[in-house]
Image (cartoon, rainbow, N blue to C red):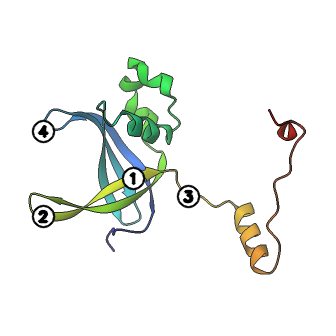
Amino acid sequence: MAYEVGPRYTGTVTAATLTESSMKGTPGIELAIEGDQGAVRHTIYLTPKTRERAERDLALFGVKPEELRKPAFWEALETRLVGKELGFGFAEEEFKGETRLKIAYLASPKKETAATLAVKAATLFGAKPSQPSLSDDDSVPF
Protein backbone atom coordinates (compact mmCIF):
# COMPACT_ATOMS: atom_id res chain seq x y z
CA MET A 1 0.00 0.00 0.00
CA ALA A 2 1.08 3.57 -0.55
CA TYR A 3 0.35 6.80 1.27
CA GLU A 4 -2.46 8.91 -0.12
CA VAL A 5 -4.17 12.26 0.43
CA GLY A 6 -6.94 12.18 3.03
CA PRO A 7 -6.15 9.69 5.79
CA ARG A 8 -4.28 10.63 8.91
CA TYR A 9 -1.32 8.37 9.53
CA THR A 10 0.78 7.64 12.59
CA GLY A 11 4.52 7.05 12.56
CA THR A 12 7.70 7.11 14.62
CA VAL A 13 10.59 9.51 14.09
CA THR A 14 13.68 7.45 13.20
CA ALA A 15 16.07 10.36 12.50
CA ALA A 16 16.12 14.11 13.08
CA THR A 17 18.91 16.35 11.81
CA LEU A 18 19.53 20.01 11.23
CA THR A 19 19.82 20.66 7.52
CA GLU A 20 19.95 23.41 4.90
CA SER A 21 17.99 23.40 1.66
CA SER A 22 20.18 22.98 -1.39
CA MET A 23 18.40 25.75 -3.31
CA LYS A 24 18.46 28.68 -0.88
CA GLY A 25 20.34 27.47 2.16
CA THR A 26 17.19 27.66 4.31
CA PRO A 27 17.74 25.94 7.66
CA GLY A 28 15.40 23.21 8.76
CA ILE A 29 14.90 20.03 10.74
CA GLU A 30 14.75 16.98 8.50
CA LEU A 31 12.67 14.19 9.99
CA ALA A 32 12.69 10.58 8.86
CA ILE A 33 9.40 8.98 9.85
CA GLU A 34 8.54 5.30 9.72
CA GLY A 35 4.80 4.75 9.27
CA ASP A 36 2.54 1.83 8.44
CA GLN A 37 2.97 2.46 4.72
CA GLY A 38 6.74 2.88 4.82
CA ALA A 39 9.38 5.54 5.43
CA VAL A 40 8.80 9.21 4.60
CA ARG A 41 10.77 12.43 5.09
CA HIS A 42 9.57 15.84 6.18
CA THR A 43 11.41 19.11 6.73
CA ILE A 44 10.32 21.64 9.33
CA TYR A 45 11.75 24.86 7.89
CA LEU A 46 13.18 27.45 10.28
CA THR A 47 12.50 30.93 8.91
CA PRO A 48 10.78 34.04 10.25
CA LYS A 49 7.68 33.12 8.20
CA THR A 50 7.57 29.50 9.46
CA ARG A 51 8.59 30.21 13.06
CA GLU A 52 5.10 29.80 14.58
CA ARG A 53 4.44 26.58 12.68
CA ALA A 54 7.87 25.20 13.61
CA GLU A 55 7.23 26.04 17.25
CA ARG A 56 3.81 24.34 17.10
CA ASP A 57 5.26 21.26 15.37
CA LEU A 58 8.06 20.96 17.94
CA ALA A 59 5.52 21.29 20.76
CA LEU A 60 4.09 17.96 19.53
CA PHE A 61 7.34 16.43 20.79
CA GLY A 62 7.05 18.14 24.16
CA VAL A 63 9.50 20.92 23.30
CA LYS A 64 8.79 24.12 25.20
CA PRO A 65 9.24 27.53 23.49
CA GLU A 66 11.98 28.59 25.91
CA GLU A 67 14.04 25.52 24.95
CA LEU A 68 14.25 26.77 21.37
CA ARG A 69 16.42 29.68 22.52
CA LYS A 70 19.07 27.35 23.94
CA PRO A 71 21.88 25.95 21.76
CA ALA A 72 21.85 22.82 23.97
CA PHE A 73 18.42 21.90 22.58
CA TRP A 74 19.65 22.11 18.99
CA GLU A 75 22.82 20.14 19.84
CA ALA A 76 20.67 17.35 21.31
CA LEU A 77 17.95 17.55 18.63
CA GLU A 78 18.17 13.93 17.53
CA THR A 79 18.01 12.52 21.05
CA ARG A 80 14.96 14.69 21.78
CA LEU A 81 12.94 13.70 18.71
CA VAL A 82 13.95 10.18 17.68
CA GLY A 83 11.54 7.53 18.94
CA LYS A 84 8.63 9.95 19.32
CA GLU A 85 5.31 9.15 17.70
CA LEU A 86 3.34 11.65 15.68
CA GLY A 87 0.42 11.89 13.32
CA PHE A 88 0.74 13.24 9.79
CA GLY A 89 -1.24 13.72 6.61
CA PHE A 90 -0.45 14.35 2.96
CA ALA A 91 -1.33 16.84 0.24
CA GLU A 92 -0.47 16.86 -3.44
CA GLU A 93 2.19 19.30 -4.57
CA GLU A 94 3.24 20.25 -8.06
CA PHE A 95 6.97 20.83 -8.46
CA LYS A 96 8.74 21.32 -11.78
CA GLY A 97 5.71 20.01 -13.66
CA GLU A 98 5.46 16.85 -11.56
CA THR A 99 2.73 16.09 -9.02
CA ARG A 100 3.86 14.35 -5.86
CA LEU A 101 2.72 13.73 -2.30
CA LYS A 102 4.21 15.75 0.52
CA ILE A 103 3.47 15.78 4.22
CA ALA A 104 1.02 18.65 4.72
CA TYR A 105 0.80 18.63 8.51
CA LEU A 106 2.08 17.04 11.69
CA ALA A 107 -0.22 16.27 14.61
CA SER A 108 -0.32 14.47 17.93
CA PRO A 109 -0.54 10.72 17.49
CA LYS A 110 -4.10 9.51 17.74
CA LYS A 111 -4.15 7.02 20.55
CA GLU A 112 -7.25 5.45 21.95
CA THR A 113 -7.01 4.17 25.45
CA ALA A 114 -8.95 1.19 26.75
CA ALA A 115 -11.20 3.64 28.62
CA THR A 116 -11.93 5.58 25.41
CA LEU A 117 -12.76 2.36 23.58
CA ALA A 118 -14.98 1.23 26.48
CA VAL A 119 -16.94 4.49 26.31
CA LYS A 120 -17.35 4.12 22.54
CA ALA A 121 -18.60 0.57 22.94
CA ALA A 122 -21.02 1.50 25.73
CA THR A 123 -22.32 4.47 23.73
CA LEU A 124 -23.08 2.16 20.83
CA PHE A 125 -25.38 0.18 23.11
CA GLY A 126 -27.19 3.22 24.50
CA ALA A 127 -25.01 4.73 27.20
CA LYS A 128 -25.13 8.51 27.29
CA PRO A 129 -21.80 10.29 26.98
CA SER A 130 -20.75 11.45 30.43
CA GLN A 131 -20.43 15.13 31.22
CA PRO A 132 -17.18 16.24 32.79
CA SER A 133 -17.65 17.03 36.44
CA LEU A 134 -16.77 20.45 37.75
CA SER A 135 -14.45 20.68 40.67
CA ASP A 136 -14.83 23.53 43.14
CA ASP A 137 -12.11 25.47 41.31
CA ASP A 138 -13.79 25.04 37.93
CA SER A 139 -17.03 26.63 39.11
CA VAL A 140 -15.37 29.96 39.93
CA PRO A 141 -16.14 32.38 37.10
CA PHE A 142 -12.77 34.19 37.23
Q: Are marks 3 and 4 in contact (CB under 8 Å)?
A: no
Quadrant of the frame with the N terminus:
bottom left
Mark 3 vs mark 4: which is more N-terminal? 4
The residue to which callout 2 is attached is 98
Q: CA distance from mark 3 to mark 4?
A: 34 Å
Q: Residue furthest bottom?
A: 125
The residue to which callout 3 is attached is 110
Question: How far across and how far down the image is residue 33, in percent?
Answer: 36, 52
Q: CA distance from mark 1 to mark 4?
A: 22 Å
Which residue is drawn at the image coordinates 39% and 53% (left, top)?
105
The residue to which callout 4 is attached is 22
Up-down relation of residue 59 to residue 125 (above or below): above
Q: Are marks 4 and 2 in contact (CB under 8 Å)?
A: no
Instruction: Give the SS element for disc 1.
Output: strand
Q: Amino acid at mark 4?
A: Ser
Judged by depth in the image, the label closer to the viewer, 4 or 2, is 2
Q: Amino acid at mark 2?
A: Glu
Q: CA distance from mark 3 to mark 1?
A: 14 Å
Q: Are marks 3 and 1 in contact (CB under 8 Å)?
A: no
Q: Is residue 8 left or right of residue 103?
A: right
Instruction: Give the SS element for disc 4.
Output: loop
Is the residue marked by circle 1 packed among few (<14), some (14-19), or many (20+) residues within 10 Å?
some
Residue 53 is drawn in which quadrant?
top left
Question: How far across and how far down the image is residue 71, in percent?
Answer: 38, 18
Mark 2 vs mark 3: which is more N-terminal? 2
Judged by depth in the image, the label closer to the viewer, 1 or 4, is 1
